[in-house]
Every structure is written in C-alpha cells, then in structure tokens.
Image (tube, rainbow, N blue to C red):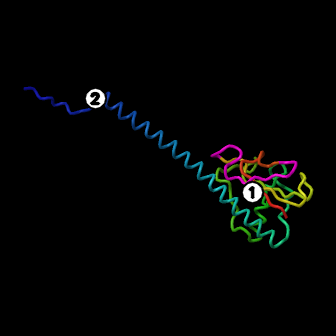
C-alpha cells in the first residue's frame, strides 16, 4: 500500500485563492470609496444647515441678510471658503453666529467655483418682489443635479436649481 505524503497546495489552488482575495479586496475598496463620498456629502449638508441657522440669526439681529463682499471669488458669488477673508461666512464667524468657517470636505484651492456659494439679491431681481439670498453647493458627489435633499430656489424668471446640485434661499 502506497501512501501519498504530498501535503502542499497545487499551483491551481493557490491561484484560485489569490484571485478570490483580489476580488474581495476590490469589492471592499469600491464600497469604502462610496462610503467616503456619501460622508463628504453628508458633511456638506450639515454645513448648509449650520449656515442657514447662522443666516437666520444674523437676519433676526440686523433685519437683513449679509450682502456680498466686494472681493467675492466665484463669478460674482460670495463663496466660503475663499482666498479672501471677507466672505459671508467670515462675517458670520466674526460676529459670533458661527464658531468656525466650514470647509468643503473635498478641499480646493480657493480659486475655482467650489465650496458654498452665497448671493444676496435686491428687491425686484428676477421677478421676486422682496430682497432674498441664494445659498448653494455646486458639486455634490453622490447624485446628479439636483440632489434629492435639495429644497430648491427660484424666482419667476430664474431657477437656481438648474445651476446647483443643492440650493436654497430666503426672503427678507
């Protein structure tokens, strides 16, 4: 009677195990990247709610929303954060309505149209009778335009939902 003393793995068995490990690693990495983009979008939405609360407190104390600064950074939109330290968010922080300047979690250099965009319009702009502000995010990562949680904002002759992934506004 002859006994087989080979207790090692064949090359085929090793290749199958390596392929399975590689496949599982790929699936885990893809899931991790999806979770990261969802987390960044959740932070953006949380920042928006904090900014809205600060804007409403500012309005309650001043009977107006902050006006756009002279050195806004994004095609006339006041943007936070920005290379300038005179944005609407900096004003809200310096006057105690917010404790810190929220930053877009994806970063950015401060030279493009990223981050949190704000503009205060006067009465009569785009067919709206009262002064109002528009606050939006251009680049949500987990959905196309509009984001499913976007409240939207429009006046009779302009709809900002077409320009932002997430947008809201408020009348004075």
Q: How would you rate the neighbour count of disc 2 (Cα within 10 Å): few for under 14, some for 14-19, many for 20 or more?
A: few
Answer with left or right where residue 129 lies relative to residue 89.
right
Magenta segment, which residues? Answer: 141-158
Quadrant of the rendered structure where residue 16 is? top left
Answer with left or right where residue 65 lies relative to residue 105.
right
Looking at the rendered image, the quarter that the C terminus falls into is bottom right
Looking at the rendered image, the quarter that the N terminus falls into is top left
Q: Is residue 155 magenta?
A: yes
Furthest residue in direction right, as rendered: 124
Q: How many numbered marks, from 0 up?
A: 2
Residue 104 rendering spot, x and y as whole percentages: 68, 54
- Which residue is identified by label 1? 80
SS at mark 2 in the image: loop
| Above/below status of 167 relative to 88 | above
> Which disc is residue 62 wearing?
none
- Which residue is identified by label 2? 10
Residue 18 rendering spot, x and y as whole percentages: 38, 34
Residue drawn at the location 20% of the way across and 33% of the way down: 7
Q: Earlier in the sequence, mark 1 or mark 2?
A: 2
The foreground one among 65 and 25 is 65
SS at mark 1 in the image: strand
Residue 142 rendering spot, x and y as whole percentages: 63, 46
């Amino acid at each position: 009677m002859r006994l087989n003393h080979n207790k090692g793995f064949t090359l085929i068995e090793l290749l199958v195990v390596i392929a399975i490990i590689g496949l599982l690693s790929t699936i885990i990495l893809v899931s991790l990247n999806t979770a990261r983009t969802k987390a960044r979008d959740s932070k953006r939405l949380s920042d928006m709610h904090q900014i809205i609360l600060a804007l409403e407190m500012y309005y309650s104390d001043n009977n107006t929303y902050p006006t756009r600064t002279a050195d806004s950074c994004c095609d006339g939109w006041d943007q936070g954060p920005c290379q300038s330290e005179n944005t609407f968010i900096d004003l809200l922080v310096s006057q105690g309505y917010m404790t810190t300047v929220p930053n877009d979690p994806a970063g950015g250099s401060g030279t493009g149209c990223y981050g949190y965009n704000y503009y205060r319009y006067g009465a009569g702009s785009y067919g709206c009778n009262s002064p109002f502000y528009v606050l939006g995010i251009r680049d949500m990562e987990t959905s196309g335009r509009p984001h499913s949680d976007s409240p939207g904002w429009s006046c009779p002759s302009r709809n900002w939902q077409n320009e932002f992934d997430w947008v809201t506004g408020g009348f004075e």
